[in-house]
Amino acid sequence: MEPVNVGVINVTGYIGVDLARLLHQHPGVNLVSVTGRSAAGQKLGEVFPHMAEVDLMIEPDLGDVELAFSALPHGASAQSVVECLEEDIKVIDISADFRLKDVDEYQQWYEVTHPAPELLSEAVFGSPELNRAEIAGARLVANPGCYPTCSILALAPAIREELVDLDIIIDSKSGVSGAGRSLKLNTHFAEANENVSAYALGGHRHMPEIRQELQVLAGGQSVSLTFVPHLIPMTRGMLSSCYARLRKRVTLGEVRELYREFYRDEPFVRVVDTAPQTKQTLGSNFCLIHPVIDPRTERLIVISCIDNLVKGGAGQAIQNMNLMLGLPETTGLDGLAVYP
Amino acid sequence: MEPVNVGVINVTGYIGVDLARLLHQHPGVNLVSVTGRSAAGQKLGEVFPHMAEVDLMIEPDLGDVELAFSALPHGASAQSVVECLEEDIKVIDISADFRLKDVDEYQQWYEVTHPAPELLSEAVFGSPELNRAEIAGARLVANPGCYPTCSILALAPAIREELVDLDIIIDSKSGVSGAGRSLKLNTHFAEANENVSAYALGGHRHMPEIRQELQVLAGGQSVSLTFVPHLIPMTRGMLSSCYARLRKRVTLGEVRELYREFYRDEPFVRVVDTAPQTKQTLGSNFCLIHPVIDPRTERLIVISCIDNLVKGGAGQAIQNMNLMLGLPETTGLDGLAVYP
Amino acid sequence: MEPVNVGVINVTGYIGVDLARLLHQHPGVNLVSVTGRSAAGQKLGEVFPHMAEVDLMIEPDLGDVELAFSALPHGASAQSVVECLEEDIKVIDISADFRLKDVDEYQQWYEVTHPAPELLSEAVFGSPELNRAEIAGARLVANPGCYPTCSILALAPAIREELVDLDIIIDSKSGVSGAGRSLKLNTHFAEANENVSAYALGGHRHMPEIRQELQVLAGGQSVSLTFVPHLIPMTRGMLSSCYARLRKRVTLGEVRELYREFYRDEPFVRVVDTAPQTKQTLGSNFCLIHPVIDPRTERLIVISCIDNLVKGGAGQAIQNMNLMLGLPETTGLDGLAVYP
Amino acid sequence: MEPVNVGVINVTGYIGVDLARLLHQHPGVNLVSVTGRSAAGQKLGEVFPHMAEVDLMIEPDLGDVELAFSALPHGASAQSVVECLEEDIKVIDISADFRLKDVDEYQQWYEVTHPAPELLSEAVFGSPELNRAEIAGARLVANPGCYPTCSILALAPAIREELVDLDIIIDSKSGVSGAGRSLKLNTHFAEANENVSAYALGGHRHMPEIRQELQVLAGGQSVSLTFVPHLIPMTRGMLSSCYARLRKRVTLGEVRELYREFYRDEPFVRVVDTAPQTKQTLGSNFCLIHPVIDPRTERLIVISCIDNLVKGGAGQAIQNMNLMLGLPETTGLDGLAVYP
């Protein structure tokens, strides 16, 4: 099979450049076009020296491709998605523009008018474990956020199988790369290093995204969700600790079995019997999930880990691309974690 | 007033040596004796080069002191406490030996027979904000654990004032120094760095300690508590994120006012209006507390931060010592955080 | 003795705020005025939460003080120094404006016209170990840079005692806080963490400063100096590795004796017999120096460590202030390193 | 072509397990056997959860393979090499046992009697850029140490082309994983984090290895070498800063041209025009080299970076294996750096 030509719109952020890295190593596609406004006219390897092997110029506009990843900021991304679709280019949108199905909720959380609300119903939420068939047939996939990826996978089996009350607390810990490549005081090294903090206590934009998908898993029932993200002094990695009250008496063995059954054929989800560590996922597309029962409170606790830029970003986007192009789902994603 | 002679039993751990550092700088006491088994016969500055200014030999046995800190491991510490009390030496026990009031609970969690259960009722739980008067009159103070210090202070106002249901989740994040100076694989640099993990999911020894004190605050009512500690790639610092359902409708302003009122005269507790960061406490005896209401779920969220070795260890022990010796409570503890 | 009123001009950088922290704890002075342009009108504790105990407003202009620290950027700092001196305020200049004695060299390296070259001859290079008497009598002290402090102290005994050839290599390693609080890509957490790099290979501004002082120590002889700084993924701390060929046959014991003799009465310099670590200086004003002989090449190697913001900045400035005000030199600087 | 069966003796160290990771992803070989004494009987994925995808049991003894990597400690490794060769198994020795050609020098630095000195002359020093042909024909390759790899590549062009005096200083900085997986106090997280130190100032075992190879490059002339390693608070990564006096007047352009020419066809060495960073090599087999001239001292400075466990260990070993098996040299090693 001929490799498919693909491109990355706005390659200059951390997910953008990790897409380029993974696509370069992908045997089923050719990365032929990368764009970026501020860096246009420079070679990719000038802006990102680790990419020096890749002979690509950063262009102002997308070249001739069959599929594109849009890694623009929200708002701008939707506009580029529209343009791609008009030219029959399939798109995986890395931004949040097509994740929330409710345009009002989108506009309230993102404080912009949605540029293309008519596409919201067509866009597929790009969680391969939950929406594989729809993704395979989609023109437009909304790649999930990092916190949603980590948290939804942790809770999906419990919610789908009605194991827990729909009143959930998710306490998430993220490496600093999740905050992006734009300079801010709280991600300045001397501020972020040797430090941990909770943030967005008034409400994080990934909360409605997680809640929406949990409600889908709950068959449309309303979910009460407290979500608190924390900034951790490491570059990559994300861990979610999820808490929910068990609805029925189950043993730990039954819970594990339920989780294993749910993810039985998933190539990138591993239900593990010992507490996972983010380091066990570094650079890989794996999600590790560890459900336990707090014996004194009859509460389900689920710990999940991902690399926030791979399974929480570029890797999952490529997994979606593989599905959309009819390639084996794991193509280009079989790297194991770089440990230690 | 003449300085009081004090000593540190087992100075060779991180809290032990931080006690020595703070006592050396304390104007009201003389640190005259430090012990340590493996290091006996060496100068303190040979084992800990940052202490080279302090001219003390590590001895096998405690010298002539009025008050001692016992930083031995649990079990062994209780025995040294007994010996001190027999010689009319006041003791602050850094170990867990006298924290739990119920000897059976102690023996179940620590898997040793308690060497001196007859002292449990006399020992005072060394939380100055909650037990100031008892500490001032005590011969034996059980210095709280780091997680309990951080978590109990976060929740005390809400529980004492009956603001929340007694079904509580505490998700804590600790720097690696909390795991001590003994070598273990999970605290080996290449394993702990760039990594975050939950641990002790089956039950951490600090859980019953937190629950006991929360139940005291709740007037003896039973508290259901889920406590999950996490290891964070930083040396010092601890942050607890506490979750409980509000029992009544209150505004954020009322919650803050209630917290400020509760800690109005406390020299080391600061109720803050922006999310605190562990870095803001590094090296200091402060505890920062930030209560908020999750507007969508009517849940109280309290974020609290300490330096796990100072307010969570050596600093709080010295605060207790000041009370026991009739010194001003802040003596020797007025250092601000070392930022950045 | 009445405390002296002092102020900090431009408190909003890392050395500025560390000056405020140390001055707040200093028993011989009152910090009564702090300035800052962008933050003027805010409380110090709003901009720097760890300083919340200090009840000071950041003002646009300096209040009524006897001595001021100017922590403005170079160029701007010289202008504020002139204004202070005109009002009979003694000044310690944290910037580089009065460090280089040769105005042409200054203008070449800093690419600005010097605003007050007439003060260059009066300004004293604020290295207490080398210029104690001059500092005590000065109106204007140029506080040395961090790299110069660490490197000059490492080499001073060897050069003054003509132990080595005047062809020297200094390979320095600095924590990221040395690059300041302004946001730059290379100090963005995700870029600086898990990374080490050499920088300023074409010439760093601290090179002429080090060379100038080494030449003074060499009695005016010319010194050939290669200086290469490196950025290390830690917040605070600096280590210099200095290499020079021995001019005569000496034993290790003789070298150590020479170094100890040179620094015999220095309160903040410790000549140590085991390789020092930056962690042994964290938050303290100490400089640790470890001279050794490479047995195979007859080369002198000197390793030195400081906290770049304390002995390499705010702490040394306060040491200079103590001398200028006739206070005991160690006042307010007796804190030991915060370890681990 | 049929994949070749290979094995790893003592898979339980950091280079051992990184060999397993890279071999698992290698299309030209099958990893069929891994050994380890303490962990024998466990699954590889039990000891190293990131390897859970690899269905291998850790065995006490090596299975049926054509080529083995021996990652045993020195001394023990030589013995296992002898056994392999007796069974016609080609070996790449990760230990230092066959790197030094002079048995006396080996015994002096490693303080053991060499178990197989008769093999020293046959063993090929496994630096593909310098000894490609010999490696391709070898039965036994001594895989270079991490410091030697990084330093020799930095200096080889300058020495081979007689650009510099043979009096060289190498100041190297290594991530903590280089110290291995065995627990030691100086690699305990709370000790190594936020810390930098020089070590082995009396002489590091990699010094004679570097000197030996530089002397080969110098056509047998004696090289005077000062080598000082430093421990840096990061997991992976190594940077060497090399200093040598230029023997003749050259321009920067000529030096760069000479370096580029020397490494023209090398797939894993990149001569770069901006200062490289270790992060640009993380997880990859690249070595970045940046030669500059210090304009004031006519000194050549060369900065080089590698991932100490890949090009400085497992990756270079696989590069050697590819040569020994007649596979394309880059097979299984084409991963780009994981940035950030």
Image (spheres, coloured by chain):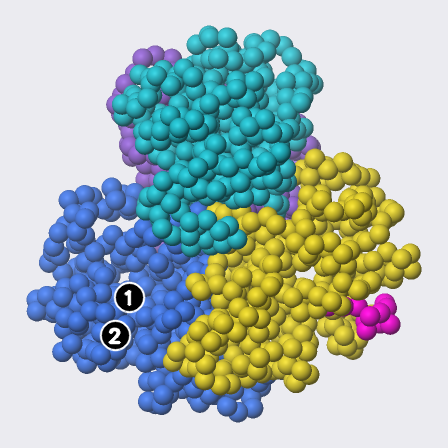
Chain colours: A cyan, B purple, C blue, D yellow
Depth order, front residue of D208/B133: D208
Q: Residue drawn 68% across and 32% down?
A: B111
Comes first in the chain, label 2 or label 1: 2
State if disc 1 and disc 2 touch (CB < 8 Å).
Answer: no
Magenta stretch contains residue C77:
no
Depth order, front residue of A227/A313: A313
In the displayed structure, A159 sits above or below D9; it is above
Mark 1 burial class by Cα count in 10 Å: few <14, some 14-19, many 20+: many
SS class, disc 1: helix
Q: Residue drawn 43% across and 17% down?
A: A122
Which stretch did the figure color magenta? Answer: D115-125
Q: Residue C310: image x %, image y %?
A: 35, 61
* Residue that carries the numbered disc 1 in the rendered image: C317
Q: In this image, B50 relative to B9: left or right?
A: left
* Residue that carries the numbered disc 2 in the rendered image: C108
Q: Residue B18: image x %, image y %?
A: 48, 51
Residue D180 in which image quadrant? bottom right
